[in-house]
Amino acid sequence: MFGAAGGMSVLHPIPPGTRDVLPDEMRELRRLQAALSDVFAAHGYGEVATPTIEYHEVLARGDERGAPAAYRFFDEDRALLALRSDMTVPIARLVATRLAADQPPFRLCYVASAYRAIRPQRAQMREFIQAGVELVGLPAPEGTAEVIEVLARSLDAVGLRRAVIGLGDADLYRQLMQEIGVDGEARTRILDRLAAHDLVGLEAEVGELALPEAARETLVRLPSLRGGPEALEAAQGIGGEAVERATRRLAATYRSLSSRGVADRVRVDLGLLRDLGYYTGAILEVYDPAIGHTLGGGGRYDELTGRFGRPLPAAGFALYLERVHLAQAEEDRLMSPQSAVRSPRVGRS
Amino acid sequence: MTVGSVAAATTVVDGPLRVAIPLGALFGGTLELLERLGVPAGGVRGGSRSLVFEAGDLVLVTMRPADVPTYVEAGAVQLGITGKDVLAEQRDRVVYELADLRYGSCRMVLAGRRGDPSLGESERRLGSMRVATKYPRTTAEHFERTGRQAEVIEVKGSVELAPLVGLADGIVDLVDTGRTLAQNDLEVREEILRSSARLVANRVAHKLRAPEIDALVARLREATS
């Protein structure tokens, strides 16, 4: 990276996955941030800030695999510190400590940088800004539905009219396997395949299980069920206690979303599996047709604050500010008449 | 053949589904499969210098197999066809692997020179073997998984060359009939994975265009089962 000749270089690089922001972009990012903050405030959410660095032990308590919090270092007392990889765990800590004497529910929001050591590419940086809310102390389905409503209004406010919220259930597949009696290594392998979105591998793994045909069919079909409320009906048709429970939960949330007028934003997706270790029940992902990456996500984490000694039901979401900005820019470009200039030459068959 | 244009590119929801078509070893099998489904893919086969083709209700985009996960992950195409070997090597690309299309079958193997003990000898005496490959990640993972040390040497061209001139003790490469190995006096020592053509989808398209994609997957499964 540095010039080879003599070690001196006119380049002054910044680490991969980080970037500088110049005034034109900054103005737009600030506008975006302000629009989101207004929505959060209008729904009664108060902004908080927490330290960028935390004790690693605290972050690992939230997500025991600790994998997302990859930037670690020691302070002068030789304590292990880490850069936060999201705001949910720090806010769980904050609720259990600073707000210990206060009565829930707590409606908190933030716009803050977080850090993850991933391979940097378009829309995926190692340092990124998240804008989100946490609703702590209100159980499902109303707590979940309120969070989704705020998310839908946020997408409206930043002009992403076509963006869609995927709604799934983090516990469903694990519970289903438990019920069917898949455990041990087979269970791990199947969850790995599912997390890698490898439906071919999933089918192969399931095919090796000594199970009745119907159970195998359920395990293979369920992750592909996605769409409007009809996906819930299709899931109910599959049957089984775990599926029944999950679809009842999702249907209750969906009804609440309908009465809040935001159900048309939501697609049910029984294949969703969030990679963060603290989710329980509902999980969310946000998509915009203009870009191929998710814009954000969230869900319920009813057991997280308990790990800090104050068990409260909770849910939240975070939008990646830079990705929302990118989606805005792409939507603008698609709508502009000049977009035809970029059309490729096409051969006809 | 005429040349026209499609609406500009990066949206996963609008317009016809764009499908990445792999050039190289999977090219023929891919076009054959599409034609069996009634997709008029003949124009892709001709000597056109175009890279993008309208074919019925699909748009076909030709590219090297190793680029398919990149285009699919970014949503520049909604669907793509590439080998399992490519997907294994680019495991950190987030794409949905939807169907095994069952053609382009081959094996990724560890091979050494016929009768030559240097793979085992290097491991015994030097603690590690030198392995040349175009698949450094899959190779490194294989040795890690099997608890052995290896020095993985990435090469871009004919891998068979490496053990012949002493760059490496062995190679990890794809084998179909085994003829190329035999011609270079190499033999299979271990199988690492079985590969075939796979259909992959962008994760956002998989959600937002579910009915179309599911219908196409169903047709492909029927045609390949």
Image: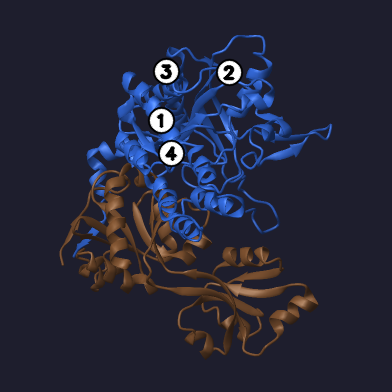
Chain colours: A blue, B brown
Relative to A175, is A349 above or below? below
Residue on which the image places disc 1: A248
Relative to B183, is B81 above or below? above
Q: Nearer the viewer, mark 1 or mark 3?
A: 1
Mark 1–mark 2 Cα distance, whole angstroms, equals 34 Å
> What is the three-letter code of the residue carrying label 4?
Val
Q: Earlier in the sequence, mark 2 or mark 4?
A: 2
Residue A256 image offset from top left, x and y in percent: 37, 21
Q: Are marks 1 and 2 in contact (CB under 8 Å)?
A: no
Mark 1–mark 3 Cα distance, whole angstroms, equals 30 Å
Compared across the picture, whether B56 is left or right of B205 comes to: left
Residue A290 visible in the picture: no
Quadrant of the snapshot with the N terminus of chain A = bottom right
> What is the three-letter code of the residue carrying label 2?
Val
Residue on which the image places disc 2: A48
Disc 2 on helix, strand or loop?
Answer: loop
Q: Quick check: do tags 2 and 3 share a chain?
A: yes
> What is the three-letter code of the residue carrying label 3?
Val
Q: Chain of mark 2?
A: A
Residue A315 image offset from top left, x and y in percent: 51, 25
Looking at the image, the residue that sits furthest to the top is: A102
Residue on which the image places disc 4: A243
Residue on which the image places disc 3: A39
Residue A57 image offset from top left, x and y in percent: 73, 33
Q: Are marks 1 and 3 in contact (CB under 8 Å)?
A: no
Relative to B126, is B10 above or below? above
Mark 2–mark 4 Cα distance, whole angstroms, equals 37 Å
Q: Are marks 1 and 4 in contact (CB under 8 Å)?
A: no
Mark 4–mark 3 Cα distance, whole angstroms, equals 35 Å
Please tell me which residue lies in front, A301 or B143: A301
